[in-house]
Amino acid sequence: MRDDQGLSEAAQLFKVLGNESRLRLLRLLGEAPLTVGELVAATGLSQPLVSQHLRSLKEAGLVTPDRRGQSVSYQLADEHVSHIVDDAVAHAQESDTTKSAD
C-alpha cells in the first residue's frame, strides 16, 4: 500500500492555493520580494485583503516576511512554491487547449 504520510498537509496546502488572488500574489513574489503596498499596486486589491491573504500564505509556510526597519517585504519560502504555482497554471492552460480541440 502507498504511504499516505503528508496527504493531509498537501490537502491543506491546496486549500490555501485554491484562491486566484493568492496565486497572483505568489506569482508576483516569485519574481521579487515585495511590500504590501507594492502588492496592492500590482494587483489592485485592497490593502486589508492583501494583508489577509499574506497572513494565510505565511501560516501555510508559503511566504516569509523580511523586516527592515519599518518596512516589511514578503518573499516565497522556497523555490518549490513557484514550481507548484507554475505547474498548476501550465496544467490549466493545457486543459483549456485540450477542451478547445474537442
Image (cartoon, grey):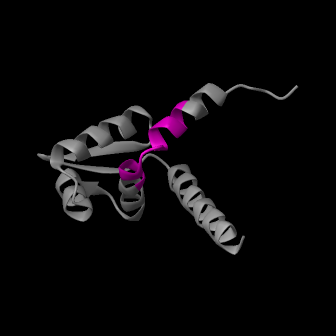
Percent from the top left, x then y, of residue 56?
36, 35
Relative horizontal placement of residue 6, taking residue 23 as reference (left or right): right
Give the residue drawn at x 20%, y 56%: 40
Magenta span includes 59? no
Relative horizontal placement of residue 71, taking residue 80 as reference (left or right): left
Percent from the top left, x then y, of residue 31?
39, 65
* Quadrant showing the N terminus: top right
Asked which quadrant contains residue 8, the reply is top right
Q: Nearer the viewer, residue 20 or 101?
A: 101
Give the residue drawn at x 38%, y 57%: 24
Asked which quadrant contains residue 9, the reply is top right
Percent from the top left, x then y, of residue 7?
66, 29
Relative horizontal placement of residue 68, taking residue 11 as reference (left or right): left
Give the residue drawn at x 45%, y 38%: 16
Q: Residue furthest left?
A: 70
Highlighted range, magenta:
12-23
Dominant secondary structure (helix, strand or loop) of the stretch shown in magenta = helix
Q: Nearer the viewer, residue 93 or 67?
A: 93
Percent from the top left, x then y, of residue 49?
23, 44
Give the residue drawn at x 26%, y 38%: 52
